[in-house]
Image: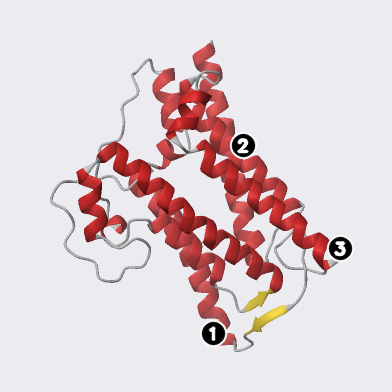
Amino acid sequence: MKKTLFFLYGVVAYTAFMATILYAIGFVGNFIVPTTIDGIPQLPFWQALLINTGFLLAFAFQHSIMARPAFKEWWTRYVPVPVERSTFVLLASIILATMMTNWQPMGGVVWNIENELVQTVLFVFYLLGWAIVFLATFMINHFELFGLRQVWLHFRNQPYTHLRFRIPYLYKYVRHPLYLGFLIAFWSTPLMTVTHLLFAVATTGYILVAIQLEERDLITVHGQQYQDYRKQVPMILPLGTKQAPAVPADANA
């Protein structure tokens, strides 16, 4: 019975994530969903700034702290190991959904590109960024990343095994294609408002910090293999890529 409940819990967490990330595509792109990153300001600028910054910090702290091995070791004293990742995913989805539905537009225009061809190109890049995000997760192990593999193995009475250290396609060109996809999506906009700029700058800063934390953990786990990979493949931009390490590696946090 417990195994079934754990599996259903993992499915609920994964479904919440998928709904949230799909909403985020419309939210950042200003289409389809009821609340988007831009709009008519409803609150004074400084009040809106504090609210938005608070949500961004809450997401960053939750995402970074709960992903660290030391926290996981403490956390799994209270949360069963098979649903630890699902719980992380569910909490991240709740915080992100709360942020998007309570986001406060602040007004102001940083740039506004009116050329239709450039608008179309930027929209294509916006969608490309999100496509890279999803592709990157499947190239490592999408279902492991979002907790489904863990609860499925537990449901099948199979022991959990760590993913082997390997370098899938995009990871041969940059160590963090998932983050690259987010950056492309967050900055590819013909209308950059002050609100969107706050979001883009804050998330870019978080990504750069998160990469340092993730790579420190990866070096601890994989040692010289990841050190070699780190030396030969650029971090976020596909510039100056050398030949990938001969030993397969898993560029996954």
Which dot marks residue 43? 3
Residue at figure coordinates x 64%, y 87% from the top left: 114
- Which circle, 1 or 3, is nearer the viewer? 3
Mark 2: which secondary structure? helix
For disc 1, the marked residue is: 118
For disc 2, the marked residue is: 91
- Which circle, 2 or 1, is nearer the viewer? 2
Q: Earlier in the sequence, mark 2 or mark 1?
A: 2
Mark 3: which secondary structure? loop
Residue at figure coordinates x 16%, y 53% from the top left: 245
Mark 1: which secondary structure? helix
Q: Earlier in the sequence, mark 1 or mark 3?
A: 3
Q: Earlier in the sequence, mark 3 or mark 2?
A: 3
Q: In the orientation shown, which residue stands out farthest toward the bottom?
A: 115
232 above or below 101?
below
Give the side of residue 159 with respect to residue 247, left or right.
Answer: right
